[in-house]
Amino acid sequence: MSVQSSAPLAGIKVLDLSAYIAGPYGCSLLADLGAQVIKIEPPDGDNLRKYPSTLAAESRAFLGVNRGKAGLCLDLKKEMGYEVLVKLVQEADVLVHNFRPSVPPRLKIDYETLSRINPRLIYCSMTGYGKTGPLADKAGYDQVLQARSGICSAQGSREQPEIVYGSAVDYYAAAMVSSGVSAALYQRERSGRGQEVCVSLLGSALAMQSARLIMAEGEPRHIDRDMRSGGITGIHPTKSGHLYLSANTPHFWNALCALAGVPGLAANENYDTVKKRAIHAGEIVPVIRQALQARTALEWEEVFGTAVPCSAVRHVEDMFDDEQVADQGFIVDQHHPKVGGYKGVARLIKFSGAEDSPPPCGAPVLGQHTQDILRRLGYSDEQIRAGLDAGAVAGPRGGG
């Protein structure tokens, strides 16, 4: 995990005490930017390791959101475990956790305590609902917040709400963790002091709906809050497979009608604006869908080319050999001590001045680097063995 000087966050040290997806993936994004990240887990590990997976050695989800980190296992309730954390905080730039607000004070890892140890520390609290308010200490999970914030009813309907699968709220929150921490580090360069950064799943869920969450003075409470983009925007069946189409501008609308062989739609003044097409969607969509039956989704993708925004609906595993993904280098070879070699996402942001950024590395085994980190902190082998025996620290299961 050597760090190259050209990486944007080279030299920044991050302590990741978080679990599940939002906090851990936010820290992986920081690792992508060149930060040195240590994932600190309790003796029983991040609960995401226990999630169902067809991989025998490790959870696929854990591998996916914990790339680029060293692994340290500490029991913060024991003296040596807490002592090790304090030593790490003294030299750290960032600490990220996702404990409920009442937990950090009990563990003596709240911002007030740790900022006295290191006034330059950027301390990021990743919570479900925020640090205050009636729901502050309620456990927050992606789909719980989807249900509470209106995402489910918008995804389906008020009568039949639907979950958005794929932990979208978690991943958006992870991006907020990364951007919030990066902004705080920038401010520290000017002020010389650290601060607490607060990110919540509730805030993430609301941010994802900024285009809906507008209520003008005097308008009714229950109205259609989605953008209506002409009826044809969406997924349509073809001769084989499904095709997503978007044709909101006059240019794209005219191109769609011409290439699909229905120029009469473009010539009809009843359909010449997005608003009009929304009103008459029931007339337009059947005509478009009938025309799409002439070719497969992949064939239409070729026909429309760059003239019409579209894509054949693909499966996630198709991304492993997608030409555009390969060109961008978004999926790279990584390695795990138990799983072995695997392909995974990395390097999603490109920097012209960081071509020699650290090569991506896989997620750590539980406690994989515990002994190396303790030796670097000045602990002797005898002290490390005593800590292992006492359960204050732990190495990888099965030895190491």
Image (cartoon, rainbow, N blue to C red):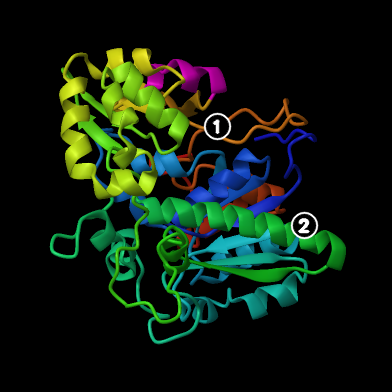
Let me know if residue 321 is in the magenta part: yes
Disc 1 to disc 2, how far (Cα)?
26 Å
Left or right, 123 with respect to 327, comes to right
Does the residue at mark 1 contact the one at mark 2 (Cβ under 8 Å)? no
Q: Nearer the viewer, residue 287 or 110?
A: 287
Q: Nearer the viewer, residue 263 or 302?
A: 263
Q: Residue at x 22, y 31 (%)?
A: 236
Q: Residue at x 61, y 39 (%)?
A: 32
Count of picture labels:
2
Name the dominant secondary structure of the magenta segment: helix
**Residue type highlighted by circle 1:** Cys
Query: Which badge, 1 or 2, is on the more N-terminal residue?
Result: 2
Q: Is residue 12 visible?
A: yes
Tell me the residue that label 2 is attached to.
186
Left or right, 312 with respect to 91, comes to left
**Residue type highlighted by circle 2:** Tyr
Q: Residue at x 76, y 45 (%)?
A: 11
Task: Say few, some or many: other residues with alpha carbon within 10 Å of mark 2 (under 14 / 14 to 19 / 20 or more).
Answer: few
* Disc number placed over residue 361 in the picture, else none: 1
The image quadrant where one finds the N terminus is top right
Occupied quadrant, residue 92: bottom right
Task: Give the x, y percent position of residue 142.
Answer: 34, 59
Q: In the rendered view, would you say 250 is above or below 144?
A: above
Q: In the rendered view, would you say 26 is above or below 332?
A: below
Q: Residue at x 66, y 41 (%)?
A: 33
